[in-house]
Image (cartoon, grey):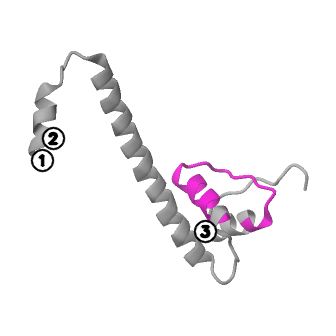
Amino acid sequence: MTRLLEQALKLDPTDSSLNSALMSARAAASDAQRARQVIERAAAVIEQCHPRVPLRTLDAIHVATAELHGAEPMCSSDQRVCNASEHIGLMLVPHPTR
């Protein structure tokens, strides 16, 4: 911890690369937090749908991402994604090829 503080004292606050690095670190932390939310919601979607709607992990991530980001109405050619979306209450638009 002491070494970290010593390093921080050596930093030049006017250095634009420092500001850029801090902004990148904040963005990465925010991205990691959003990814965690999606994964946690995907696990809940799988649980909600099981056993009535068999759902693969990537399909659950797709549905969870759409739900968390308000991407409604949803459209998919994957019947599992459509079934899971309907099951959890997401609005669907018919796929153009059906």
Q: Nearer the viewer, residue 24 or 48?
A: 24
- Percent x, y for residue 87? 65, 71
Q: Residues within 10 Å of mark 3 (few under 14, many from 20)?
A: some
Q: Nearer the viewer, mark 3 or mark 1?
A: 1
Query: Three-letter amino acid code at disc 2?
Result: Leu
Q: Are marks 2 and 1 in contact (CB under 8 Å)?
A: yes
Task: Please give left or right for residue 14 compared with residue 21 in the image.
Answer: left
Provide the residue designation for mark 2. 4
Of all residues, the one furthest to the front in this rendering is 3
Q: Residue at x 40, y 41 (%)?
A: 28
Q: Position of residue 26 (x, y in %)?
A: 34, 38
Q: Secondary structure at mark 3?
A: helix
Q: Which range is magenta?
A: 59-80
Up/down of 91 relative to 87, above or below: above
Q: Earlier in the sequence, mark 3 or mark 1?
A: 1
Q: Label 3, on which residue?
A: 88
Query: Looking at the image, is mark 3 or mark 2 nearer the viewer?
Result: 2
State if disc 2 and disc 3 touch (CB < 8 Å): no
Q: Is residue 74 left or right of residue 14?
A: right
> Considering only order in the chain, which callout, 2 or 3, is on the residue closer to the N terminus?
2
Q: Image quadrant for the C terminus?
A: bottom right
Q: Which image quadrant is residue 46 in?
A: bottom right
Distance (Cα) linking label 2 and label 1: 5 Å
Q: Quadrant of residue 36?
A: bottom left
Task: Using the numbered discs, state the Cα–Cα distance from disc 3 to disc 1 in whole angstroms.
Answer: 47 Å
Q: Which mark is residue 1?
A: 1
